[in-house]
């Protein structure tokens, strides 16, 4: 019997070898024909091929290169810069013989999107180019069950450096998906592979492309829990009209880039830009990524997708736990709210609230508050579960009531553009002056809040120049990072406000040069009838040739107030003082800034700033100066 089995195996192997040898000349002829057809059709110049290889022009030199920073993404030695060579090499590899011992390693399985596109464009039959089995890819696609695509935008979360601009990802919707089942759908997410707890380091590395970007897939309910519950971020869902075939091609390309290293850059090669390029591969000719050549701020990419006629078919809003709690708090009077908080904190039993409709709302508020604090890590998990069990047991014995729906806020795409330029005239240090400001991204406390998080300022690469009469233009500030979080404290949550900035500033008066600075500190904020007040302990390290040892470190209070005088007008008032370790140096400041919106893209602004500076020197001179300006701002 063993002899017969061995003989059969040998005959089988010999037959396979003969068939392979017989097929080799035919496969070689098919490859020659395919490469010739590709050259005749000039496929290497097709924009769809450029999308598949992530080709783009260098911003400075204009030379073509791929965004992929991994040699394994290419089949030709110079494939990162030579589309024609890469196409020839890809075709050659796709025609390689089958690998029964490692089917998933075959080039057709490693590059399924390229394989699919080339097979379609060259009309290659199964006889010319045999289809190779790809077990891992097929299992992954089967689990996801692609039917359509939804663009998901979790709003900005200023307390996480990785999410300060907001974020975009894709949800792959199976056929026949319902409201009840969409949480089970899978997502395609691209993000920097980094520990984002250190905001300064994350910003610095993100600005210089020192993090690898990675693509991942996970169930949507995991992301909803992460964004809506743990980070309290509202989530917007934009249903796209991609067909099932286009969705499958998107997944094929996601598979290709999933194992590839891309350097992650904050402003251009980021999460949102990669998502747009996935859409471009799914539908050749869409080119939705093209307008975002220099920057790809997530909210701006959402605007770009919405602006494409017919691409978005439906928009839905998913309120975060924090937003829902804020809404429910408005439905309770102060005494009832305090009682509900006492239940959530275990200082009062749920049964003590009674069984009235108001008590039911109190129980539901307490239930969500316990969950909110548990997800935020402010409550031990076992303790949170115990409190939830007690509250929910009491609540289950009471009837259902209508507690209203969370109001849907203005959609993110309705907000102002991220870039802003400003020109103003006025007085500085007793002389007539002009002021020029440029901010590529993306929002500050005086900008219109529609579509943005309240109390959040995130400015990157902020530049300011001034020209006094009879003098040339001088740099007033260059701030790669300037972040302020003004988070109002409420009876049920007491978030920490904070601020940080670093770069170059003119800190010692208009007559002295700007110098390096690092500043920031903790704070607190309160809101009352539309007035948002805040106070910070502002610490600052500055470098300048006019101070002892060329550097000084100081600290002091800064208080401010934001007031919306109307739908289109906002006033900001601030005052503060800092004392430095060089006791001869101290600074006091008071400023006012008024912004009135003229149009969706234009503001009229006016500002006043008084600064008193105690300057180091033998006579410890003090000087004060004023800056007065009125001008225009334009968003772009």
Image (spheres, rainbow, N blue to C red):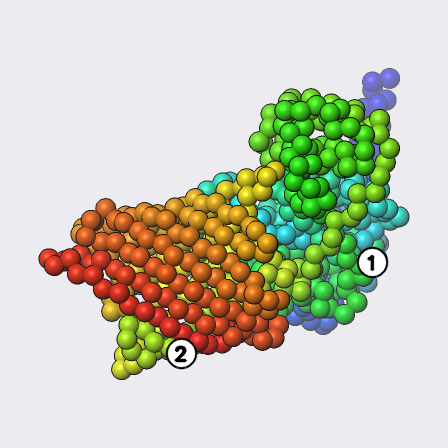
In this view of the protein, can residue 155 be seen by the observer? Answer: yes
Quadrant for the N terminus in the image:
top right
From this view, report whether residue 319 is shown above or below residue 595: above
Residue pictured at 44% horizontal, 49% vertical: 535
Sequence-wise, which precedes: disc 2 or disc 1?
1
Q: Name the one closer to the observer, 185 or 566.
A: 566
Residue 243 image label = 1
Q: Name the one closer to the observer, 362 or 299.
A: 362
Where residue 300 sits in the image (x, y, percent)?
62, 63
Q: CA distance from mark 2 to mark 1?
A: 54 Å
Q: Residues within 10 Å of mark 2 (few under 14, many from 20)?
A: some
In this view of the protein, can residue 88 be seen by the observer? Answer: no
Quadrant for the C terminus in the image:
bottom right
Residue annotated with mark 2: 425
Residue pictured at 70% horizontal, 56% vertical: 409
Q: Provide the secondary structure element on which disc 1 rests.
A: loop
Where residue 215 sits in the image (x, y, percent)?
63, 47
Residue pictured at 26% horizontal, 65% vertical: 624
Where residue 62 sits in the image (x, y, percent)?
51, 71
């Amino acid at each position: 019997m063993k002899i017969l089995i061995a003989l059969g195996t040998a005959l089988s192997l010999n037959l396979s070898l003969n068939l392979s040898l017989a097929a080799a000349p035919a496969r070689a002829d098919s490859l020659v024909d395919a490469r010739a057809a590709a050259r005749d059709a000039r496929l290497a110049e097709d924009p769809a091929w450029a999308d598949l290889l992530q080709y783009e022009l260098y911003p400075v030199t204009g030379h073509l290169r791929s965004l992929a920073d991994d040699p394994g993404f290419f089949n030709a030695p110079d494939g990162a810069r030579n589309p024609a060579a890469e196409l020839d090499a890809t075709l050659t590899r796709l025609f390689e013989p089958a690998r029964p011992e490692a089917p998933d390693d075959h080039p057709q399985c490693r590059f399924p999107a390229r394989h699919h596109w080339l097979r379609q464009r060259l009309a290659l039959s199964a006889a010319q180019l045999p289809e190779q089995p790809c077990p891992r890819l097929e299992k992954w696609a089967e689990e996801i069950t692609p039917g359509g695509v939804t663009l998901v935008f979790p709003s900005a979360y200023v307390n996480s450096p990785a999410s300060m601009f907001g974020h975009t990802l894709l949800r792959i919707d199976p056929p026949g998906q319902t409201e009840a089942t969409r949480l089970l759908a899978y997502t395609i997410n691209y993000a920097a592979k980094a520990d984002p707890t250190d905001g300064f380091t994350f910003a610095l590395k993100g600005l210089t492309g020192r993090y690898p970007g990675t693509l991942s897939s996970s169930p949507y309910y995991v992301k909803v829990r992460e964004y809506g519950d743990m980070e309290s971020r509202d989530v917007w869902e934009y249903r796209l009209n991609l067909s099932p075939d286009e969705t499958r091609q998107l997944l094929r390309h996601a598979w290709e880039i999933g194992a590839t290293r891309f350097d992650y850059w904050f402003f251009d090669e980021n999460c949102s830009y990669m998502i747009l390029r996935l859409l471009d591969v799914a539908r050749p000719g869409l080119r939705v990524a093209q307008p975002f050549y220099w920057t790809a701020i997530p909210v701006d990419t959402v605007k770009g997708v919405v602006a494409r006629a017919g691409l978005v078919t439906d928009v839905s809003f998913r309120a975060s736990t924090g937003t829902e709690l804020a809404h429910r708090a408005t439905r309770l009077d102060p005494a009832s709210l305090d009682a509900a908080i006492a239940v959530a904190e275990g200082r009062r039993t749920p049964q003590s609230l009674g069984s009235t409709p108001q008590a039911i709302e109190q129980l539901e508020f307490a239930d969500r508050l316990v969950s909110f604090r548990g997800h935020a890590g402010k409550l031990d998990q076992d303790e949170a579960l115990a409190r939830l069990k007690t509250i929910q047991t009491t609540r289950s014995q009471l009837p259902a009531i209508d507690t209203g729906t969370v109001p849907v806020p203005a959609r993110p795409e309705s907000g102002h553009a991220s870039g802003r330029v400003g020109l103003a005239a006025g007085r500085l240090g007793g002389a007539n002056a002009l002021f020029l400001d440029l901010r590529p991204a993306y929002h500050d406390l005086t900008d219109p809040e529609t579509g943005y998080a309240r109390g959040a300022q995130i400015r990157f690469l902020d530049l300011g120049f001034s020209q006094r009469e009879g003098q040339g233009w001088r740099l007033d500030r260059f701030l790669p990072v300037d972040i302020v979080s003004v988070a109002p404290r409420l009876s049920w949550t007491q978030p920490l406000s904070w601020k940080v900035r670093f770069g170059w500033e003119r800190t010692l008066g208009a007559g002295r040069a700007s110098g390096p600075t690092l500043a920031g500190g903790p704070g607190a904020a309160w809101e009352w009838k539309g007035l948002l007040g805040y106070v910070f302990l502002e610490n600052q390290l500055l470098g300048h040739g006019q101070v002892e040892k060329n550097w000084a470190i100081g600290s002091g209070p800064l208080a401010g107030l934001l007031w919306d005088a109307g739908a289109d007008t906002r006033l900001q008032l601030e005052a503060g003082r800092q004392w430095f370790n060089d006791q001869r140096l101290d600074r006091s400041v008071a400023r006012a800034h008024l912004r009135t919106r003229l149009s969706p893209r234009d503001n009229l602004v006016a500002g006043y700033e008084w600064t008193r500076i105690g300057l180091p020197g033998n006579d410890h001179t003090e000087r004060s100066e004023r800056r007065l300006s009125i001008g225009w701002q334009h968003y772009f």
